[in-house]
Image (tube, grey):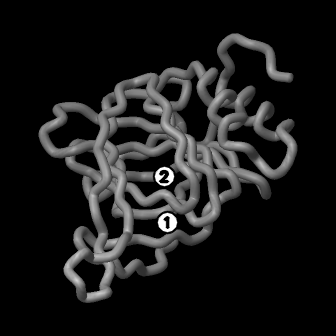
Amino acid sequence: MIASGSLTLAEVRDALLALPHPFRREDVHRIVARLDATPLELARYQHWSDEKYTRTRFYEGERFEILVLCWQEGQMSPIHDHANSICSMLVLEGEAATTMYEVRAAGDGSGGKALVKEGAARLAAGNLTTVYGGDIHKVGNPEGSGHRLITIHFYLPPITEMLVWDEGDPTPRTCRAVTLDPEPA
């Protein structure tokens, strides 16, 4: 049983390591919700790029991985799923925009499929969201936000490949994400 109170990122990692397998979404969410970290504490995991958002490894194990993502204004992920992983995302600094999608029948009688927006949300610093592997979404720091964005992602199990979609196209393709190593301590 996990006691109440705030946890460092290393303590969250240890609490997740103590969970039985398979992971349950509600247990992961409950533990990650207790994370209390600052951008300064995670400075060595912050890589900033003008070309695209970055993903830097905090922890990688057989059962899960923890990444720190840095987003300049206007940087968004592709529309993607999470393979067979639970993904909890905590906004550390800034405000994240997320849009959920679903692939369903086109509705035009063609028998085809359509990629349809299901909803959108803004997540302020301190907000947490948890999605399942089959959920389809995009996330990021939209143009005009006026700030940078730092998010912490927990992927249980680690994701080696995911499906990605182009806006309006119901046909996915397989993609491998690039993950960076932290700066030396």
The disc placed on residue 55 is 2
Amino acid tagged 2: Arg
x, y (%) of residue 145?
18, 35
The disc placed on residue 177 is 1
> Which of 108/16 is in front?
108
x, y (%) of residue 158?
66, 58
Residue at (50, 64) in percent of width and height: 178
x, y (%) of residue 4?
73, 12
Residue at (44, 32) in percent of width and height: 91
| Label 1 with label 2: CB-CB less than 8 Å | yes
Packing grade of label 2 (10 A; few <14, some 14-19, many >=20) is many
Q: In the displayed image of the protein, which residue is found farthest to the bottom?
A: 110
Q: Is 29 on the left-hand or right-hand side of 44?
A: right
Quadrant, the C terminus: top right
x, y (%) of residue 90?
50, 33
> Which of 50/55 is in front?
55
> Which of 154/48 is in front?
154
The disc placed on residue 87 is none
Mark closest to the chain's N terminus, 1 or 2: 2
Q: Secondary structure at mark 1?
A: loop
Residue at (58, 19) in percent of width and height: 36
Q: Is 184 on the left-hand or right-hand side of 93?
A: right
- Examine the image and state in which quarter residue 104 appears: bottom left
3D distance between C-alphas at marks 1 and 2: 8 Å
